[in-house]
Image (cartoon, coloured by chain):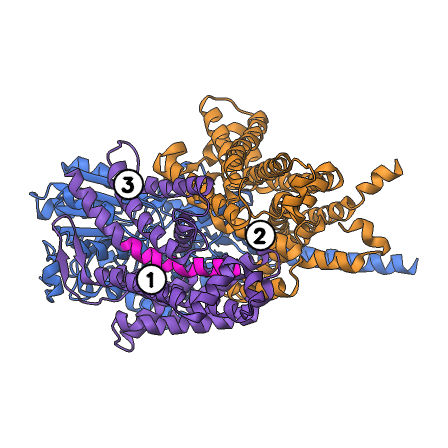
Chain colours: A orange, B purple, C blue
Amino acid sequence: MRKQSAKYSPFIPVLTIYVLIFLIGKGVSGMWQVMAMLTFYCALGQAFNIFLGMTGYVDFGYVAFMGVGTYGMALTITHLAERGITGPAVIVLGMLLALLFPTLLSMAVGAVALRLRGAYFAIATIGVNEGFRYLIEGAKIWNGSEGIIFMSELNRVLGREAASSLSTFWSDVFLFVIATLAALVTLYFMRTRIGYALTALREDEDAAKVMGINVTKYKIMAFITSACFAGLVGAASWALKTPYVFPPEVFEIHYTIEAIIIVLLGGAGTLLGPVIGGLIYGLSKYYLSIFLPGFQLLIFAPIIIIIIVAFPEGIMGMVKEKAKGSSLARFIV
Amino acid sequence: MVLEQLTGNLLQGLVLGAVYGMATMGLSLIFGVLKVVNVGHGAFIMVGAFVTLWAFTTLGMPPLVAIPLAFLIGMGLGFVFYYSAIKRLIKAPELASLLATFSIGILLEEIVKLIFGSEFRGYNWVVPKIDLGVTVLPMSKLYAFIGSIIIALLLYLWFNKTRAGTAMRSVVEDTEGARVCGVNVGWVYANSFAIGIGLTVASGVLLTMFIPVGINPYMGGGYTLKAFVIAVLGGLSSPYGAFFGGLVFGLIENGSYTLFALIPGVEPFALTRFLSFVMLLIILLIRPTGLLKAK
Amino acid sequence: MKNLYRFAVLFAFLAVLAFTTTSVAVDKIVIGHPACLSGKYAKAGEQAVGGIKACVDWVNNVYGGVSIGGKKVPLVYKYYDCESKKEAVTSLIARLINSDKVQVVFAPYSSGLTLRGAPVAESRKMLYMDHGGANNKIFQQGFKYVVQTIGPATRYHEGTLNMIHKVDPSAKKVALAYEDSEFAKMVMVGAEKRAKELGFDVVFKRTYPKGVTDLTPLLSAMKAARPDFVLGGGHFEDGQLFNRQMADLDINVKALSLIAAATLPAFYKALTTMAEGVMGPSHWEYGVKYCKAEAKRIGMIWVGPSQDEFVRLFKKALGKDIIPDYHAAEAGAQVLAYVLAVEKSNSTNSDKVRKALGELKFMSFYGGWDIDETGLQIGHSMVDVQWQGGKRVIVWPEEAQTGKLYYPMPTFKEKAKGKLAIP
């Protein structure tokens, strides 16, 4: 029993950080939205890390999964509201659709793109992201470029009070839950056969294949899992928090880049990495926007370059190296 | 009538495609030699556009003269960024270089914004127009077309007829083998990067000859995505492949508009974009080395 | 035990402090604004901040402050940079409400970002003023605290159609070519409706994606439809591209009106003579004839700086010698509307001020201001501006004209030879 729980002890620092963020958000007045923003970045990083960190593949079209998750929730709310169905069950159903859509999309993408490696994979996934977005706009699917604005439908489904607290509080609580789940799943993957297979293929895919590892199966598992979390993040942080969907916004490549920055800053493939990365990224953005409005990117860009050049393994990667052999090692993964 | 439209669009597409193709040659060169994807590609095109704007409005230089100027500025930038950042990242996981090039792109955008402001600018180079019946072509577009072809030819000559160029080709083929043969790989890396950036910045000049308005610090993004598609079409490692990929891309993007416009109830423009990405995926699946036979 | 004693004293002290601070009267009114100072809306955001600063300056130094509770209190303007991105908007609004204790929040530029901040503002019962979100649907969502100062999207090209209908009844064929984004689509919807009402024949109706780099296929198809005049546009860069490529393809029409881009000074600078005679609808343009005398003539309350005063204060606020455009004017007008409503309700309580805003009807340098019960702006009319000899002239409506309309527009060949659209 002790051995079992020891396997999961790296989860403790992650959970502690999230609980702390939650408490600060609840306790200190005005900090809730800031903490929600930080959790968004941490959740995004954790979800992205499940695929990137474990396999080393860069999915440049990642935001598409967030986008379809958002649409899943938005469509559920608008269609059910039209039919007069109300109540929290609608939100639950929305979450399910927010899981279904990315699963379908990632299976389709995976079938095409996962045969490719490295830069080709990255570019193929951009292709999917942009292609899908233009399909929605061009074929006028789901209202096309006009998007969906559904605050009034949300009010009908839940009632004004509940809808308001959903948009300003509960959707962020969902984010915490999603982030925590993503961390757990990451750890689970790391500690089981999936993790060993993925690490092997990250180091040398051909060698792994030769050793008999079913590389494709594990890649797809990680890919779909990562996509599903993205869908949930989109549903919670975009659909529920901001009751509107405009295609150019939910397919904006900027979010994929942010996910990459967060994971890289923190350390790809580590558990704590995305959390630390998310915190650093979110806090820097926030304080820079307050004290140096208009200059954030000018300052941020060279800092990222310096960090990447100096610490290609990310911050947690470096910490992991330093902590090897010490008593803290089992908490830092 | 449709045929007329189609021909007109195809002609325009060919001309634009040449410019796009030339713009992508730098991307393919850098990837071929250094195996680094320059995600900040569009930002360098933007720099070229601003160089043209500045040269035209402040120095009174016609854009054609700005081309070599832009190329030199580009090479300079290339060397700066290579020695400060890229060099250390060649051995790192490719993700690191992706992020680094992306950040370099952002840095450029912000610096240009600081110097020039975020206003949308343009310039007006007064040249005659040619009426081809099916469409109208200003001479500036024709110059851009010819310019792209000339630069592509020059590059071809350089790669195949000079020692330096051959050295670069050898590194693309087999880095270790080239090293063993005595090629100074580090020097090749630096120069390839610089030339690649130089080409990209110079293409910004040609692009403004095609579209001389809407110049602003954030204009690069759309071009980066197009460049990726074109680069893959032509084979990621081959600069000439990129050129032909550009031509194909231009033809298909413009030509398909007329065809999509025949379908009721859809927005043809967005669908042409969709088509280009479908093309991308198909190529990647069937022939990842690109449309041209692998050299 | 000693520590406990110390703690109790501290606690009592803080409690007393808390109670006393809450009963202090209002001594300043704080406006909060998560502005777009970088990112894609940087230009509009900078203008808006300048306009707000200009009017705050006027209120404090010329008007004497806001009359509330028998005193005159100053306005304070607190703003941060949301980078034109969703994520920062909610956290910055929360900070403004909680740490900076603002009494009103001005929304960030663009319909999307306005919508993003609305739920947070509504949940805190905070007045939320919209100067940059023209999408009508914002006001169909049931928000209680959102008030619009910018005119709704559907009305942008209505005036243009009215004008052409009056000036040239023989021009029947119109082409609609807009950017495929929620704002421009709304304009198109309104334009199409009005065109049909007036008996125009829509011969071409297409959209193009945001961020387009080459409009040739669309424009070639439009040329084939032989429209008499063209309405279209989206945001900034596509407007310039549109005009330029129409010139490149030698497409000549009697009138061309583009939204957003065409009325900005950068437009003519980039296009020079190609822009002669090109028009655009605008919420405000330097040169409009709204002034105190005009307000008196039609019996409306007048408030705020005169147009020239506004321009002067704007330049002072930004420290640059640039003329304000409509982004600045609509943001500045918002300040005036707020001040009037606070004075009318003698309170900064959001419910009371919102009610006062609903009853308010006034004119300022920006034009008329009046909202309906959903918060939608109905009192403000757009003007149509035309480039004549490199200068912007207001040509419609007739009561706001600063010059006559030049119609039909010269051909691009004529313009290249130097023909100017001066009547």
What residue would you read off at disc 2? A260
- Residue C182 spot, x, y in % from top left: 36, 43
Horizontal and vertical percent for residue B126? Answer: 18, 67
Tag shown at residue B152: 1
Which residue is labeled 3 in the image? B256
**Marks 3 and 1, how far apart in space?**
26 Å
Residue C57, compared with residue A80, is above or below; it is below
Three-letter code, disc 1: Ala
- Magenta highlight on residue B109: no
Q: Tell me if C407 is positioned left or right of C135 in this view.
A: left
Q: Is residue A180 left or right of residue C285?
A: right
Most extreme residue toward the right is: C1
Residue extending furthest bottom? Answer: B59
Front residue (pair C125, B222): B222
Segment tinted magenta in the rendering = B16-36
Q: What is the chain identity of the residue bearing mark 1?
A: B
A97 or C53, nearer to the observer: A97
Where is the N terminus of chain A found, in terms of image quarters? top right
